[in-house]
Amino acid sequence: MENGKWSLRVICTFFFITSSSAEFLIRQKSGLSLEFSCTAFPDAIVIDGLSVNHSDKSSEEEEQLTYDGPDFQELDENMRRSFHKFLEARGIKPSVTDFMHEYMMKKDSREYLLWLKNLKNFIQE
């Protein structure tokens, strides 16, 4: 997703019956980006961590200079709320993560059925 000033990349890393773990990378044209590590529940998104990165840095420089910031829960409550509003303004809200979770559940079921079909074909040959 892009709007001219920033782009959004979503990585769903794990999904469980009741929640999903996802990373949201919001990159500006300048190369600066915010990476949010989140846990998405049906009615809420919990931000677990937040880091600022710059894509122009070499991976060695980045590794040396990257500071992931303090524990998100230790930030001022107003700052935490502002980051949630920041994500919502970019379309990242529970309804979107609910869709992602449902999609991943269906994808997992389809892949399992395909695996069973391939297994059956192998055994029948």
Image (cartoon, rainbow, N blue to C red):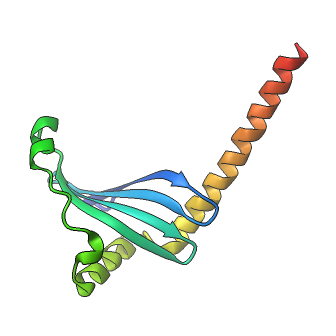
Q: Residue at image x 78%, y 39%?
A: 113
Residue 88 image point, x, y percent: 39, 75
Q: Residue at image x 74%, y 32%?
A: 115
Whether 21 is drawn above or below 41: the answer is above
Tell me the quadrant of the picture where the C terminus can be found: top right
Q: Is residue 56 visible?
A: no
Please tell me which residue lies in front, 116 or 94: 116
Residue 6 image point, x, y percent: 26, 59
Q: Is residue 105 left or right of residue 68?
A: right
Q: Is residue 66 left or right of residue 102?
A: left
Residue 41 image point, x, y percent: 54, 71
Tell me the quadrant of the picture where the N terminus can be found: bottom left
Residue 15 image point, x, y percent: 56, 55
Residue furthest to the bottom? 78
| Res. 27 image quadrant | bottom left
Whether 104 is drawn above or below 19: the answer is above
| Res. 8 image quadrant | bottom left
Q: Is residue 71 left or right of residue 94?
A: left
Q: Is residue 111 left or right of residue 72?
A: right
Q: Residue at image x 39%, y 56%?
A: 23
Q: Residue at image x 67%, y 46%?
A: 108
